[in-house]
Image (cartoon, coloured by chain):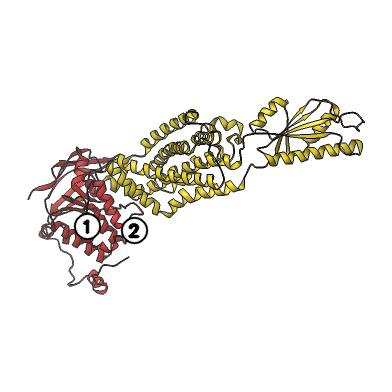
Amino acid sequence: MGQALRLTLMYLRAYLRDRTAVFFSLVVPLMLLLIFGSLNLGAFGQVSLAIDDQANTTASQSFVAALEKIDTLAVKHLSADAALAELKRTELDMLLVIPKDFAIAPTRAGQPVPTLTMYGNDARPQQVSVGGSIVNEVITRLSFAVNQTAPVVNLKQEDVQGVRLRYVDFLVPGILGVNVMQLAIFSVAFALVVDKRRGVLRRIMATPLKPITFLVAQVVTRLIMATLQVLIMLAVAVFLFDVHPLGGILPLLLVSLFGAVLFLTIGFALAGWAETENQVPAIAQLITLPQFFFSGVFFSKEAAPAFIRPVTNLLPLTFLNDALREISVQGATLWDVRGQLLGLLVWTAIGLLLAVRFFRFDRF
Amino acid sequence: MTAIVSVRELQKHYGDIHAVRGISFEVLQGEIFGLLGPNGAGKTTTVEILEGLRKADGGVAIVDGIDVSKEPAKAKERVGVQLQQSAFPENFTAKETVELFALCYGVTVDAMALLKEVDLADKAGQRQEKLSGGQRQRLSIATALVNKPRVLFLDEPTTGLDPQARRNLWELVRGIRQSGTTVFLTTHYMDEAEVLCDRVAVMDHGEIIAMDPPRTLITALLGRGFTKPMIQQQATLEDVFLDLTGHELRED
């Protein structure tokens, strides 16, 4: 035990001296977080608008048709109740209810003006304000077309409180997951293939050191680096981007380290399989790149084409990111994400089998 | 003199290749023993079996009383190893490299004293990957001495070194033998074997074809009527080179 610990400390000191390794384990992840965190992607795109057309008259239909022609709006038809539920889950930006008495006609004295009700998700203020002005603009134009007068309908706005999910809130768990994956796979695969090819491993195996002690030192060194990486990124997320991981820091760290162990097994398998360090980037990219895009790092995993989603939903990083995101955004506990943890466990078992199969000390 | 390494009927195959074909020999305690032969003769395979790095297909290899194939870990504790084309982990200083290997043997050493022994005390704080070829070979010998080995295995220790560094290493090897460690080395430099080794075994195609002190082998050859055209020359080009550039060790 003491030997493993001292070996770990020696390797950790060497790791921290390696500028390239430190750059890729700590600086690059931070850059990714800073760049994507400040881009605020997804803050604006289309405004999703549900319409409940209770009038269903020629007038209301032409009004809806006019709204549907506007590119910025993604219009769908929903009952007010269903749409309000979606609004609360921030799956929708706005709801427009067209009353039964809707008409675009000159006002007559004594008659009430039809009132449109528009619900906006207050978690998406920009979308609501843009959507609101568009709807207003359409009403004004229709009114002029019909009456050459000012609007004849009222637009009443109400706020609905949705989950305040900013892009950076969505991004942080994904960034944690992807960087843990990169660190675990690349740091092990590169370093150990180089050590294997240059005869370092063989030299160490000529001493009485037990292979398991060597492996423990290598793994623990990377887990310490992963811990550092996760804590630094969470610190930046909390203090710079005002992200509040609802489920707490500790569960996020534990799940990240679980993910790191999984990807380390893949790193070892790769280091054992590859003959030279030139083969590592190709295979490592082949493994990591699909997960980079399809496992919900920078955008929702639902962005993957539907036909490959059954596969992408089973990728190791998808399980990791889903677990991290549920903990961070929805305040889930470790027990709540047991399904994802089970997925990680299955992948770890597969990785371990591959590592044992390919990373053979007697072949070095 | 008792045998410290004893090899009987050692066999090793790599697929169809019969790399070691039932060789037998003994290395005596306190001698410098050379295993000579062209590339591919089976020298390295033989040494690596003795070091516990490879399993033999047949025969017995005993090092310091331990059957290597039965107790490789125990055998590894008794020997010092310098592998052909081996390297050390990067981002370790020379001193840390020595400490790393001491840790691998589970022993504590005075790393500075060991570095001084191989004339690297002034490089203790330097990253090992920045050392010159000769310095790295000497560091390699320092790491092979951390466990106070009974036998030191050196696999082609002077390949790629300049004449000064080679001579420096020979001195180092002699000093190690002086302190009581048996030295087992492989080389394909005959001048090296001639000046350094007490006894040599010549290996080719997986078999030992001659074994004796270098002088005895030379005398036997001359006795068989061997002659070569002699040009009376009191110096070689290497002597010229060393005269011009000095015996002082160079930094790369």
Q: Which chain is yellow?
A: A
| Residue name at image x 81 percent, y 31 percent | A115
Image disc number at residue B127: 2
Q: CA distance from mark 1 to mark 2?
A: 17 Å
Compared across the picture, whether A187 is left or right of A30 comes to left
Residue B44: image location, x then y, percent = 25, 49
| Residue name at image x 55 percent, y 36 percent | A329
Q: Mark 1 or mark 2: which comes first in sequence?
A: 1
Residue B40 shows in this picture: no
Residue A129: image location, x then y, percent = 73, 41
Query: Which amino acid, by three-letter code, is at mark 1?
Result: Leu
Query: Looking at the image, which is closer to me, A167 or A330?
Result: A330
Q: Which residue is mark 1?
A: B114
Q: Which chain is red?
A: B
The quadrant of the rendering that contains the C terminus of chain B is: bottom left
Query: Which amino acid, by three-letter code, is at mark 2?
Result: Arg
What SS does tag 1 mark? Answer: helix
Residue A265: image location, x then y, percent = 40, 38
Q: Check the residue under mark 1 and report the chain it is in.
A: B
Please tell me whether residue A62 is drawn above or below residue B252 in the rendered image. above
Crowd tier of the residue under label 1, counting other residues whose Cα lies within 10 Å: few below 14, some 14–19, many 20 or above: many
Residue B142 shows in this picture: yes
Please tell me whether residue A264 is drawn above or below residue B216 in the rendered image. above
Farthest residue toward the front? A110
